[in-house]
Image: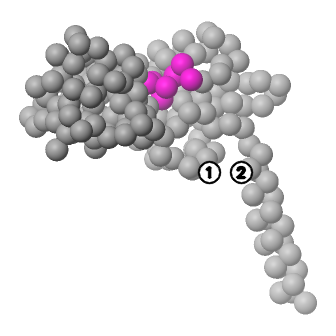
Amino acid sequence: MKQPYRNSVFYTFLFCLSVVVLCAENPGICQGWSKTEIQLLPDSCFALVEVKDGQKIRRCPHHDSNGKLDEEQLIYVLGALDNETWVDQANKEMAEKHLKKHYDKFIAKVMKKGLHDSVNINSAGLTKLVALPQIGPVLAVKIVEYRKSVSSFEKIEQIKKVEGIGSATFNAIKHYICVK
């Protein structure tokens, strides 16, 4: 008789866990992390926690479960910050300030190293793209989104099809990029 009781407790637990996962608050904009992974993160992994109608809304995850900064995720949330819907606009500014502190430390290290190889704009991650002159998080995210939604680049000049990349930006990066 103990076995059916254990099974029912186990299945009840699984049901409750799935309800929590499915009904929990929107995890915010994220790249490459599942909704479940984000929901299991502690609040300290987010740039800001807002409260709306008594519900926590955790914004801009950028640390992994061990508290380590995820640079790709940091760049993504900075680049997509305007796509979030904020309870209070002042919170967006606080989150952006927090994220930019991390980004400034990261980009200083990147700039100190410099670019040693050309950057393949068809496969480079966000951390490689922001190393290019005049390419910050917003343009890096736009490049990646363009590759996903439109197509890969056949010639480096096609990067000018990405919104925000004009002749001046192209001229600044053309010697550093390739399409291999």
The residue sitting at 88% across, 80% down in the picture is 5
Neighbourhood count class around disc 1 (C-alpha, 10 Å): few under 14, some 14–19, many 20 upward = some
Which disc is residue 21 wearing?
2
Q: Is residue 137 visible?
A: no
The residues tagged by marks 1 and 2 sit, at their Cα atoms, a distance apart of: 6 Å
Please state the extent of the stretch shown in magenta in the rendering: 77-83
- Quadrant housing the N terminus: bottom right
The amino acid at mark 2 is Val
Q: Are marks 1 and 2 in contact (CB under 8 Å)?
A: yes
The numbered mark, 1 or 2, whose residue comes first in the sequence reads: 2
Q: Judge from the rendering whether residue 71 lies leftward or rightward of residue 13; answer left or right.
A: left
Of helix, strand and loop, which one carries label 1? helix
| Residue at the spot of label 1 | 36
The residue sitting at 86% across, 75% down in the picture is 8
Of helix, strand and loop, which one carries label 2? helix
Q: Judge from the rendering whether residue 18 lies leftward or rightward of residue 90; answer left or right.
A: right
The image shows residue 123, relative to residue 74, as above or below, that is below
- Quadrant housing the C terminus: top left
What percent of the width, then of the height, locates residue 152? Answer: 32, 40
The residue sitting at 54% across, 19% down in the picture is 82
The amino acid at mark 1 is Thr
Q: Judge from the rendering whether residue 160 lies leftward or rightward of residue 163; answer left or right.
A: left
The image shows residue 83, relative to residue 31, as above or below, that is above
What percent of the width, then of the height, locates residue 76? Answer: 43, 31
Between residues 103 and 76, which one lies in front from this camera angle?
A: 76
The image shows residue 10, relative to residue 26, as above or below, that is below
Between residues 31 and 153, which one lies in front from this camera angle?
A: 153
